[in-house]
């Protein structure tokens, strides 16, 4: 299957914390970072999500917020993937920012031109990709 989501991360389920309607699923990425997804209890059952299961976490570039100086910042988003800006492609409407993580994996984000200027985005600048857990879609091999 081909999909339009630029961000695709392979990992393993570390934990599943069920709630009344949704569950929090924590994934370990090969590079040591984690991604948390919020999915329905029905999805946990139908995908057989449990510790050790291989999964793919997907999220669109438009769902990624970019932060350049996180000192003192407190967020409600569960996912913060720190790395370095390795690419910046400025288009007529927005810019695509590529953040390379220490593992070599890349996170892609789309941001406005004003945000690029305000954050001082350019190659080599440390940056963090921030993704809310409900924006993460999980898939399993069939």
Image (cartoon, grey):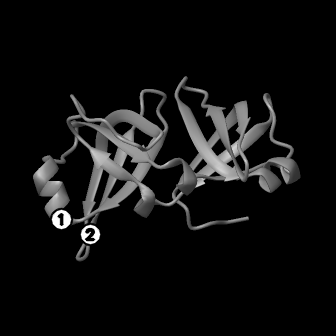
At x 36% / y 49%, what residue is drawn? Answer: 98
Q: Which residue, given by chain and number where applicable, does mark 2 sit on?
A: 94
Q: Position of residue 70 (x, y in %)?
A: 24, 33
Q: Position of residue 5 (x, y in %)?
A: 55, 62
How many C-alpha atoms fall within 10 Å of the one at disc 1: few (<14), some, or many (≥20)? some
Side of 141 where 70 appears, left or right: left
At x 23% / y 76%, what residue is drawn? Answer: 92
Closer to the chain start, of discs 2 and 1, is 2
How far apart marks 2 and 1 lie (CA) works out to 6 Å
Q: What's the mark number on residue 113?
A: 1
Side of 34 where 87 appears, left or right: left
Side of 127 where 26 appears, left or right: right
- Do labels 2 and 1 touch, CB within 8 Å? yes
At x 18% / y 56%, what residue is drawn? Answer: 116
Q: Secondary structure at mark 2?
A: loop
**Among all residues in the image, which is located at the extreme bottom?**
92
């Amino acid at each position: 299957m081909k999909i339009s989501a630029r961000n695709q991360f392979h990992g393993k389920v570390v934990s599943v914390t069920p709630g009344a309607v949704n569950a929090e699923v924590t994934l370990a990425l090969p590079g040591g970072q984690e991604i948390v997804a919020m999915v329905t209890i029905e999805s946990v059952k139908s995908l057989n999500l449990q510790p050790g299961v291989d999964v793919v976490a997907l999220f669109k570039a438009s769902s990624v917020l970019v932060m350049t100086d996180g000192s003192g910042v407190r967020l409600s988003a569960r996912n913060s993937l720190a790395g370095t800006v390795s690419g910046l492609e400025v288009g007529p409407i927005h810019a695509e920012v590529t953040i390379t993580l220490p593992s070599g994996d890349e996170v892609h984000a789309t941001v406005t031109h004003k945000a690029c200027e305000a954050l001082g985005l350019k190659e080599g600048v440390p940056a963090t990709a921030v993704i809310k857990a409900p924006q993460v879609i999980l898939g399993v091999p069939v």
